[in-house]
Amino acid sequence: MTTFQVIFLGIVQGLTEFLPISSSAHLVLVPYLLKWDYPPVALDAALHFGTFLSLLVYFFPEVLKLLRGFALSFSKGRRSSAEEKLYIRLSWLIIIGTIPAVVAALLFKGQIESTFKAATVPSVFLLLTGVLLALVDTFSNPSLNMASLNPFKALLIGAFQGLALLPGVSRSGATISAGLIVGLKRDEAARFSFLLSLPIVVGATILEISSLSFEGLSWGQFLIGVAVSALVGILCIHYFLKFLKRSRLIWFAIYCWLFGLFALLKIFVF
């Protein structure tokens, strides 16, 4: 791939990993629609590692609190503060919420990977993502913060995250929608969605790096992909959280419908 293509896909990944419009669909459809070669595994790993760095940098104070909370959960006889108790609970809720996606990945790995081979599949699932966003945006009445979460709610949000293993089903869109279903405010649902994604993104990155092949990509391009997706990802997280405090998800639903329909027309008509 050319360096321009690496930079372009880095921008696409940094935006679509966190906006509820499916990064997997875009990384399949954008090269297809532009008639580019499909990105090599090394670039996919670079882009996912970049967005992992985005999460780690932006939520670094909270990540430290979660790690400390997890460690404190094994301390017996210690009186924890209210904040420590919150992060002890959240650390275990994130573990609980990660279970469905791990189980789905282990049980259906082959079937899931096969869906990435055709541009039609992510186009259709992109349309369904739009339907999900529109429904929860219309009928949910969010008012709660993350402190209201319990194991059942975390497991439900995690189940929606498991669905996002399919290309075209937005991970952030699915988990934010589930958060709204259980009553979380939009920005709180997004924050939990992003924190919940950390174990999954780490696991996916490790798996990709373990089978890394630099065929068609140089080390310099790999590092450019990491840097671009990380920088764009940080900016996207920041402004998306601000956006959710004052606006709705319906705009992203409309985008999913338009892009999904355009891709299907391009595949079957043009």
Image (spheres, rainbow, N blue to C red):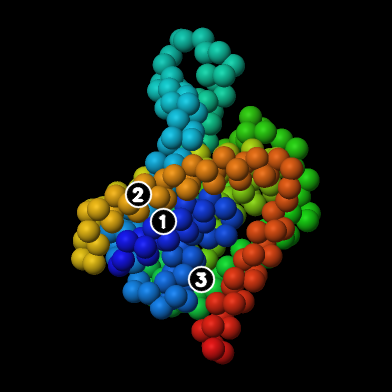
> Do residues under tags 1 and 2 come within 8 Å of each other at their CB atoms?
yes
Residue displayed at 53% across by 60% down? 22
Q: Dot 2 lies on which element?
A: helix
Q: Dot 1 lies on which element?
A: helix
- Disc on the earlier residue, 1 or 2: 1
- Disc on the earlier residue, 1 or 3: 1
> Comparing marks 2 and 3, which lies closer to the viewer?
2
As drawn, the label of residue 187 is: none
> Do residues under tags 2 and 3 come within 8 Å of each other at their CB atoms?
no
Residue 80 vs residue 183: left or right? left
Q: Quadrant of residue 150?
A: top right
Residue displayed at 46% across by 55% down? 11
Mark 2 surroundings: few (<14), some (14-19) or many (≥20) residues within 10 A: many
- Disc on the earlier residue, 2 or 3: 3
Residue displayed at 52% across by 19% down? 84
Residue highlighted by disc 1: 10
Q: Nearer the viewer, residue 9 or 182?
A: 9
Task: Tell me the amino acid under the disc marked 2.
Answer: Val
Q: Nearer the viewer, residue 105 or 41?
A: 41
> Comparing marks 1 and 3, which lies closer to the viewer?
1
Residue 142 spot, x, y in % from top left: 74, 42
- Image: 15 above or below 74: below
Task: Tell me the amino acid under the disc marked 3.
Answer: Pro
Residue highlighted by disc 2: 226
Task: Tell me the amino acid under the disc marked 1.
Answer: Gly
> Where does the N terminus fall, quadrant-wise?
bottom left
Q: CA distance from mark 1 to mark 3?
A: 19 Å
**Residue 25 visible to an observer of this rendering:** yes
Q: Quadrant of residue 179?
A: top right
